[in-house]
């Protein structure tokens, strides 16, 4: 009898955790974890239930449902990693994909730390320890993600995060994402990108108006036998310029 009562309370706590994980954001109101509650062109602010994490850190991130959303159709996915200390806001994502078709996700960094400094201190793995539960929760809440178009993209610090994921071969990163975009960055602990697979598509972009680290990333990838697509931006520096947005979007559009 005690076991039955204990099981009941465990189930109750799980259900409470899932329901509380949805928050109202702008004009979005989602009350249950059913996919039928997801509405086209809405932005959701999600919090990962504590029982899904292995620490006490709060994990809040934003998701935007595309205009052409249908629960019966798979959606291509863009997960964006921002520059500087990161952001969990959809507003941080540049228009590099068609938002009428793509599911957009903004994942933050732990305690707004800089990936570059974490690489130097050999603590970059803690970033994925923090972010992976958010991606796992997303996959649980929205299972109809296109298996062929799952993009991990980042600019500057975000590109270092993407590069580190490829380099460290993080579980749930290199075996989940199919496309990687590194703009104006991409440094990593060993710069060997051992998690890159022949089935992956990789794009490295950088401006020619500054001494971009992107050139070094391309060189290191080629040393490891990886041949990424490369776009050099003649009129851009270390920025997410309109030139870079247009070039990346054109590359994605033909995937």
Image: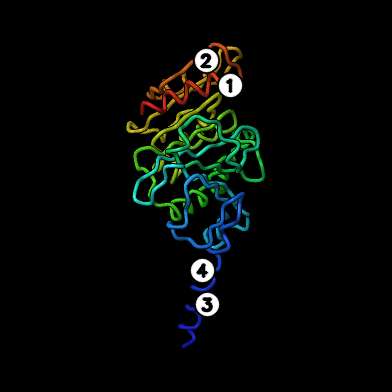
Q: Is residue 162 visible?
A: yes
Q: Which residue: 63% across, 54% down?
A: 57
What residue is shown with label 4? 15
Is tag 3's residue or tag 4's residue first in the polypeptide sequence?
3
What residue is shown with label 2? 233
In the displayed structure, 10 sits above or below 134; it is below
Q: How many angstroms separate mark 3 from mark 4 (CA)? A: 10 Å
Q: Nearer the viewer, mark 2 or mark 1?
A: 1
What residue is shown with label 3? 9
What residue is shown with label 1? 241
Tell me, yes or no, whether the two marked residues, 3 and 2, touch with CB atoms within 8 Å. Answer: no
The answer to whether 147 appears left or right of 215 in the picture is left
Q: Is residue 54 visible?
A: no
Q: Secondary structure at mark 3?
A: helix
Is 104 or 41 nearer to us in this picture?
41
In the displayed structure, 157 sits above or below 176; it is above
């Amino acid at each position: 009898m005690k076991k039955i009562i204990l099981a009941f309370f465990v189930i109750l706590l799980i259900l409470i955790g899932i329901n509380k994980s949805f928050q109202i954001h702008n004009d979005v109101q989602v009350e249950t974890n059913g996919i039928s509650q997801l509405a086209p062109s809405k932005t959701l602010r999600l919090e990962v239930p504590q029982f899904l994490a292995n620490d006490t850190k709060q994990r809040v991130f934003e998701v935007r449902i595309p205009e052409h959303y249908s629960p019966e159709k798979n959606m291509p996915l863009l997960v964006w990693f921002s520059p500087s200390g990161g952001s969990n806001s959809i507003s941080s994502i540049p228009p590099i994909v068609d938002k009428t078709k793509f599911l957009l996700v903004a994942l933050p960094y732990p305690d707004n730390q800089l990936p570059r400094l974490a690489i130097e201190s050999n603590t970059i793995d803690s970033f994925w320890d923090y972010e992976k539960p958010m991606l796992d929760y997303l996959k649980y809440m929205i299972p109809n993600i296109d298996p062929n178009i799952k993009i991990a993209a980042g600019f500057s610090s975000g590109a270092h995060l993407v590069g580190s994921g490829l380099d460290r071969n993080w579980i749930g990163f290199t075996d989940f994402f199919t496309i990687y975009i590194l703009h104006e960055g991409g440094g990593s602990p060993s710069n060997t990108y051992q998690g890159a697979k022949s089935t992956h598509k990789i794009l490295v972009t950088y401006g020619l108006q500054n001494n971009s680290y992107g050139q070094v990333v391309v060189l290191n990838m080629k040393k490891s036998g990886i041949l990424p697509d490369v776009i050099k931006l003649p009129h851009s520096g270390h920025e997410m310029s309109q030139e870079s947005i247009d070039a990346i979007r054109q590359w994605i559009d033909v995937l």
